[in-house]
Amino acid sequence: MRAKPHALALVAVLAVSGCAGSAGGQPQAGDTRFVAGDGKVTVFPAADRKQAPAVEGTTLDGAKASIAAHKGKVVVLNFWASWCGPCRAEAPVLKDIYAKTKSTGVEFVGIDFKDRQADALAFERTEQPGYPSIFDQPGKVALSFQGTVPPAAIPSTLIIDEQGRVAARALGAVKYNDLLKAVTQVRDE
């Protein structure tokens, strides 16, 4: 039995709409499909913050990196990939905010996932962020944040407070003033 063209079109529409989450475009708990974010930074009240999982790995240039190495400092984690257009768009924002806040005790660590290492290295050569990125091709670091960041939400940015708790989150490309304000707020607590 051959499917009718309009039936195939309906299946295609339903499949595509499933990528954005469920009804109303909002993901349900446990939804691991692609999540398009608006880049808005949400700062969590201190009483509601959860401990960040251990994050460590080999950087794109072969060194070791971890958020534990920055214990007692605010750490901004950015999940990115070279093939991600919004990641490319936000790269200058992250680079500039890192440069502005590094001397005040804020560290940045990138998490490059679902990417080819050669492409990621080329991206870093072009952007020159100034901070390391852990190469996490299989996405294990992203999965460790499941419940905080949907594993398919890219780019995503987390701010880890001095106590090692997730203090803020942005899904989608961050906006300069929003990220700077959130980093400053968490740093000054």
Image (tube, grey):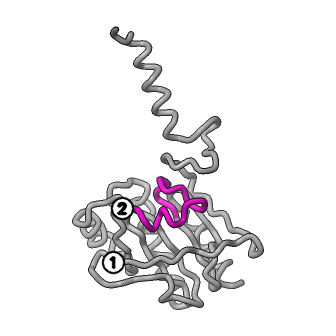
Task: Write down the quadrant of residue 119 in the picture.
Answer: bottom left
Q: Residues within 10 Å of mark 1 (few under 14, many from 20)?
A: some
The segment highlighted magenta reads 138-156
**In the image, what residue occupies the spot 39% across and 53% down?**
85
Does 130 sit above or below residue 37?
A: below
Q: CA distance from mark 2 to mark 1?
A: 14 Å
State the image coordinates of residue 95 (x, y, percent, origin top left). 43, 74
For residue 50: magenta?
no
Residue at the disc numbered 1: 59
Residue 104, given in percent of the width and then of the height, sits at 57, 90
In the rendered view, would you say 133 is above or below 80? below
Q: Residue at x 63, y 35 (%)?
A: 23
Camera sees residue 60 = yes
Q: Residue furthest right?
A: 47
Residue 171 or residue 27, whichever sits in front: 27
**Left-right relation of 117 to 90:** left
Residue under numbered circle 2: 138
Q: Which quarter of the figure is the C terminus placed in?
A: bottom right
Amino acid at the residue labelled 2: Pro
- The image shows residue 6 at horizontal and vertical percentages of 43, 13
> Where residue 7 sits in the image (x, y, percent)?
44, 15
**Camera-side residue of 119 and 177:** 119
What's the residue type where badge 1 is placed?
Answer: Thr
